[in-house]
Image (cartoon, rainbow, N blue to C red):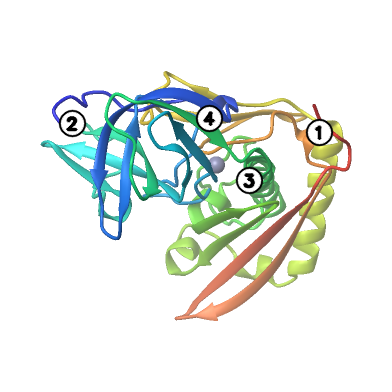
Amino acid sequence: MTLLTTDTTITYPDGATTSTGTVIHVELLSDGLSAVLLDTTAFHPVDTAWPDQPADHGTITTEAQGTQAIVDAVTGGIHDGRLFLGADLPVRTGTEGWVFVVAHIVDGPAPAIGDIARIDVDVAYRAALSVAHTACHLAALALDAALAAAWSKPVSADALGNPAFDSLAIRTSRISPHHSVDIYRIGKSLRRKGFIPTSLDDLDAVANQINAQLAQWVNAGGAVRIERGDNALSARRTWVCVLPGGRTDIPCGGTHAHDLAELSAVITSFTATEADGALELTMETVVSPTTAARP
Ligand SMILES: [Zn+2]
């Protein structure tokens, strides 16, 4: 493992769905599975610390093994010559002194070190995740805006200048094709920061306000891109979207639509449950697939 001194180069933040790279390490796992590391890949892995967007679906093709399904893709970290994969990775991506890699998991005989490997991502599945991820960020900004008056004290602001309910209260975010589920916790610490829980008494009104805002943004359209310092897996990446109210940015490791016009309609709905003296708010966001054929 001493050969691996640099992160995997990743091309998916720019929208790539195919790539050609060299196999630089293969690690045998249990149950006949292997982790294949490439110098460069278009395959989006699930992040260990913040697993919002699931791994891509797709294949790896080498001359020796032919075309094989990639059954999973996880983030790995290398430290002191050891590879830690997925849930075993004890540090956040970007931690000093570690090398971060995309581990493509294959079932059966693995390609060998030095093989040239072509990656082909399932384009339809990726596109469905990308529009859902973009919609998820928009919904979070619309939620912050809808709850802008729900605070009795000043708190940190989001990219549009509204109190950052989403980043202060979020517990988990899960993206699936054309769909996302965000779970927020309204407990003691959020109330101490000045959040007024009765602002959530009429969730239908909150949803209506958000949906009106989302419709306005989607109809206006706007360019979406990922900005990043370099192509390394651990480089800081930012989702940038141009909205009528200004340019927004949110730290993000996922993939996205290229323009809000790709989202034909975005609808959110809410449910709330009481647990351990805290309110748990679930925001579900659904994107209608576009009917127009796209090049
Ligand atoms: Zn994101």
Ligand 1 closer than 8 Å to the CB at disc 3? no
Q: Residues within 10 Å of mark 4 (few under 14, many from 20)?
A: many
The residue wearing badge 3 is 129
Image-quarter location of ligand 1: top right
**Percent position of residue 162, x then y:** 63, 43
Helix, strand or loop for disc 4: helix
Contact, mark 4 vs mark 1 (Cβ under 8 Å): no
Ligand 1 closer than 8 Å to the CB at disc 1? no
Residue type (three-letter) at the residue carrying disc 3: Leu
Q: Earlier in the sequence, mark 3 or mark 1?
A: 3
The mark found on residue 97 in the picture is 2
Q: Earlier in the sequence, mark 4 or mark 3?
A: 4
Contact, mark 2 vs mark 3 (Cβ under 8 Å): no
Residue type (three-letter) at the residue carrying disc 1: Ala
280 up-or-down from 114: above or below: below
Q: Mark 2 and mark 4: span between their CA atoms? A: 24 Å
User: Which circle, 4 or 1, is nearer the viewer?
Assistant: 4
- Identify the image quadrant of residue 261: top right
User: Which circle, 2 or 4, is nearer the viewer?
Assistant: 4
The mark found on residue 261 in the picture is 1
**Percent position of residue 53, x then y:** 53, 48
Q: Earlier in the sequence, mark 2 or mark 4?
A: 4
Q: Earlier in the sequence, mark 4 or mark 1?
A: 4
Q: Earlier in the sequence, mark 2 or mark 3?
A: 2
